[in-house]
Image (cartoon, rainbow, N blue to C red):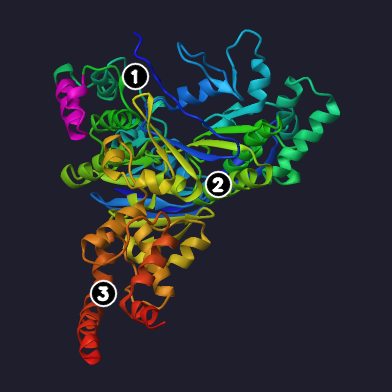
Amino acid sequence: MASPAVHGLSAELADGQFIGLIGHTGSGKSTFVQLLNGLLRPSSGRILYNSEDVWGQKYDRKKLRAEVGLVFQYPEHQLFEADVLTDVCFGPRNMGLSAEEQKERALAALRQVKLDESCYAMSPFELSGGQKRRAAIAGVLAMQPKVLILDEPTAGLDPRGRDEIYDLISGMHRELGITILLVSHSMDDVAKYMDRILVMNGGVIACDGTPKEVFSRVRELEEMGLAAPQISYIMRHLQEQGIPVRTDALTVEEAAREILRRLPGKRDTAAER
Amino acid sequence: MILTKGLIHNYTKKDDEGNTLSVIRALDGVDIEVKAGEFVAILGHNGSGKSTLAKHINALLYPSGGEVWVDGMNTEDAEKLWEIRQRAGMIFQNPDNQIIGQIVEEDVGFGPENLGVPTQEIRERVDESLKAVGMLEYREKSPNRLSGGQKQRVSIAGVIAMHPGCIIMDEPTAMLDPSGRKEVIRAARALNDVERITILLITHYMEEVIYASRVIVMDGGRIAMQGTPREVFSHVEKLKALHLDVPAATELAYILKKNGLALPDGILTKEELAAALKPYFSASGQESEQGEHVNPGREC
């Protein structure tokens, strides 16, 4: 039984990008991200990190896994230490850092994910769902990765928890300048936050571009079991109903601006000026 | 069908000696009545008590105070336990944790088999249940080969095969991709429409709530809001204060209203939004057309 999960896939992720990875269940997303940090070995083809073949003879894959941090789905299931701080120290400890360095990095990571100091000494199991998720992300951040891969980091969180995690990740991208690849099933979220989207289908990259480029191909996305963000269906419907709006808005705010701009009254004043 | 009276639930944390360390009140006096055939959506942020409530209806938890009645049976009546669980089936978030059979039809037959249903009838029930969720053609497949949405529909078929009066779905689409979400919600609506099965849907996706006959919003273990989707989503500010989203069309209408457009409250769908916006564009659209005709005239 060897139908490849990923085959003939070529993609280049540049430093500092914030990339969304979408695709239906079974499209190969998880296989792809595990290949990226050396958890899986390609059956053929190569993975280059900073131009070096990560499966080359002398390549230090342990170092790769620290530099390319992977946050799995439901990462809070992997919290296991007695208290939050010790749990976050686990990664740096594995890297062979001294006790002080471990703690220093762990504290920095916990501050980065905005987990309240009162939580540090608590058992991970006493935290709320959103807090657990942040503690788990801190565990990966403490290794100070240059690339951070997150597999559905907001699954199962409520709208507030989701917004908090996205704000956090966007903030890390901005402030730490790390490259982020984020797997999501929410078209609305990737449209709102990412500057590049990769679409996987049948083990290959079917589409690669800015959110506007990718989501203009609604038909194709739907054929792949995906969709466009809610707002783009609304704008399309308005246009079909004779309301003269562009249909490429990706957020509700952008859509509102577009409708207001097209209001006949507004158009007249614009023309007068 | 479902009735809760002053339902209270405390999660008690105890130390090794059994001394109470802390008590968290997850439900704080909840009164709900769900009539047979309703489609009720339950919203609320994490920790608001939604899932605790769901588990009470399925007799997975027992009240710390108050009562829960399912089809006239008190959930604390130990003798009725299995009948209650058969009447009120439950679907959870993760499809992979709910499927046990090696073959789809075997999995769906598990429930009725446990109820002691005769073999011939099990076959019939399995077929009709798989048909109801549009999975009949996959009956002989291995569940491992199915997509998330398909697995979740098999789970639902497994519940239907027990002939429940009500299905409680606790975030059934949280782990699914867009088409999987659509499949599951379509199946839930069809069960409600066609089979008249009462549905209680817990979700964070507002677009899944639009079609419910009633929406209950939970906060801090209590009911914070209740009404038709239109009534509830008319209160955008209040929902935002409760850290909830509103459907995209509702939010867009809300922003446009803040910018001076006189749109009605409670717009839920793109169709309603288009209908409400049309007058702005058609009436003045004609004016500006006339304007364009007039202007060149003046020039001459």
**On the rendered image, what quadrant is the N terminus of chain A found in?**
top left
Q: Are marks 3 and 1 on the same chain?
A: yes
Relative placement, left or right, of B48 versus A136 is left
Amino acid under disc 2: Tyr
Which residue is denoted by mark 1 in the rendering?
Answer: B144
Number of marks present in the image shown: 3
Residue nearest the observer in this picture, A142 or A205: A205
Which residue lies at the image location 28% right of the left edge and 39% below the top edge?
A220
- Using the image, determine if residue B81 lies above or below residue B5: above
Q: Which portion, as a residue range, is magenta?
A: B121-139
Q: Position of residue A38 (x, y in %)?
A: 57, 18
Judge whether residue B236 can be spotted in this image: yes
Q: Residues within 10 Å of mark 3 (few under 14, many from 20)?
A: some
Residue at the spot of label 3: B281
State the separation of the CA atoms marked 3 and 1. 52 Å
Observer able to see residue B203: no
Query: What x and y, as percent, mark residue B242?
Result: 51, 59
Q: Nearer the viewer, residue B200 or A121?
A: A121
